[in-house]
Image (cartoon, helix red, strand yellow):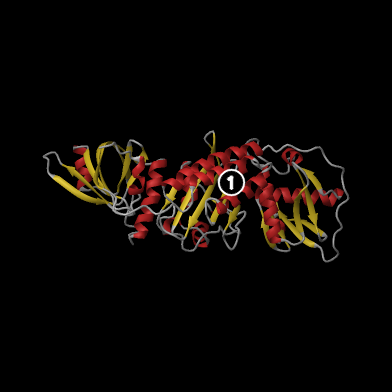
Amino acid sequence: MKDISLTSLRASLEGAIPSEIATCDAHGVPNVSVISDVHYVDPEHVAISYQFFSKTRANILINPQATVLMKHPLTCAQHRLRLHYLRTEHDGALFETMKAKLAGIASHEGMAGIFRLLGADIYRVINIELVREDSLPLPPPRAPLLSALRQTLPRLAASRDLDSLVAALLESLQSEFKLSHVMLLMADAEGNRLYTLASQGYPESGVGAEILPGQGVIGVAAREKTPIRLTHATRDYLYGRAIRDALRESPLAARLETEIPLPGLATSGSQIAVPLLSAGRLIGVLYAESPEEGHFGYDEEDALVILAGHLAAAIEALSGESEENPATVRDAPPVDTGAPLTIRHYPEDDSVFVDDEYVIKGVAGAILWLLLSEHAKTGRTEFSNKELRLSPQIRLPEFSENLEARLILLRRRLAERSKYLGLDKAGRGRFRLCLRRPVTLIPVTLVDDKA
């Protein structure tokens, strides 16, 4: 019989249908147990979750041989794996991936809070045997993934700035990959948080919303720098107001942007988060979800990992966007008459409020306040990325801060929150402050606020 590759059987490892594992003790007495999932590691290795000290666990520590019977969830084909136990991992990327997957299976089976991953047992695959051939045909793929990549990657490569890159990404995820609910999050320079740069498919964009590394499927993917994929709904990894309310009770609350709720499906059946990496450094995370359980498989994961690699490279290439030769300074567009906008700035976190409504904070807030202050002094409306990078007022980190991403974030937040205040592109590496009402600037200190 022709050799069977483990890679071709990855769908059988999803855990949709539980597998059985057979082991023997030192005296050759067999034991058969049902296991929640078998995890694909690479073409020669699998991992099995270690959740409690069972007879199976005791057996493999004495006799490291095991046999697993697994079933394809769609075709009903069955295969038997002969395995040799190597080691147990208690942390790291593989452990966190399996922990997330186990949480999804547990919630799906009504066992949330009962299944708890203690370790990931790594096995080498010695042999694969076909037990029963396919009984049912495979359904057609939801999206032709190779074709989707072929159509998408040239669009990303053709983007001349970060704004057009993000637009091309969102359009391609919808049209080519058939993904309706997606988010792109960027990592700050220190890697202490992720902020939402763009989203698609949600009632509210959530632009500017933040999460911490380790929070939910996105945060775990960021912290471990590895894809995290959930095939079943799980309360442990849901987003939205509930998880943010819980964070407010923790010491980490002050580090988060709590005024902007992260978008997310109320009933998310499956999720996938793929980190964007450049030379091992985290750039951001691409996230997608679906109300349908089992929507994302290994093939979707492979395709999105390839896409994320190209996306990270494109972001890095565009992050140092060069400046065009400055155009002739034009007169500022006329400002509509009317009551002035009252704009308050809190220097402690650079938060900005317009007529008592929160708009933005952090680096983007510092940029907005600088532009407004300069306009108040000189009447200027056109600025360059270069002068922002050199400005001590913004306090950009010396390395790795993606200024263009912060400008996109600020432009999108202003478009959502204010009819009278905005930013427009004015050429490569240049932008224009747009004021449609007079403004009154009020710097606020903690003393002023308490008074």
* Count of all numbered marks drawn on residues in the image: 1
Q: Residues within 10 Å of mark 1 (few under 14, many from 20)?
A: many
Q: Secondary structure at mark 1?
A: strand
Tell me the quarter of the picture where residue 316 sits.
Answer: top right
Left or right relative to 214: residue 256? right
Whether 445 is drawn above or below 128: the answer is: below
Instruction: For residue 373, say whether it is visible.
Output: yes
Residue at 53 percent of width and 42 percent of height:
308
At label 1, the amino acid type is: Met
- Nearer-the-camera pick, 141 or 342: 141
- Residue 258, x across and y down, in percent: 58, 57
| Residue pointed to by mark 1 | 186
Image quarter (top left, top right, bottom left or bottom right) of the N terminus: top left
Question: Can residue 347 be seen in this snapshot?
Answer: no
Q: Position of residue 211 (x, y in %)?
A: 54, 52
- Write the residue at 38% across / 55% down: 104
- Residue at x 39% of width, y 54% of height: 139
Report the side of 357 relative to 229 (left or right). Answer: right
Q: Is residue 205 left or right of residue 444?
A: left
Residue extending furthest toward the bottom: 338
Horizontal placement of 305 versus 344: left or right?
left
Q: Position of residue 368 (x, y in %)?
A: 73, 51
Quarter of the C terminus within the rendering: bottom right
Given residues 213 and 4, the one toward you in this image is: 4
Position in image of residue 126 (x %, y %):
26, 35
* Viewer-closest of 177 and 305: 177
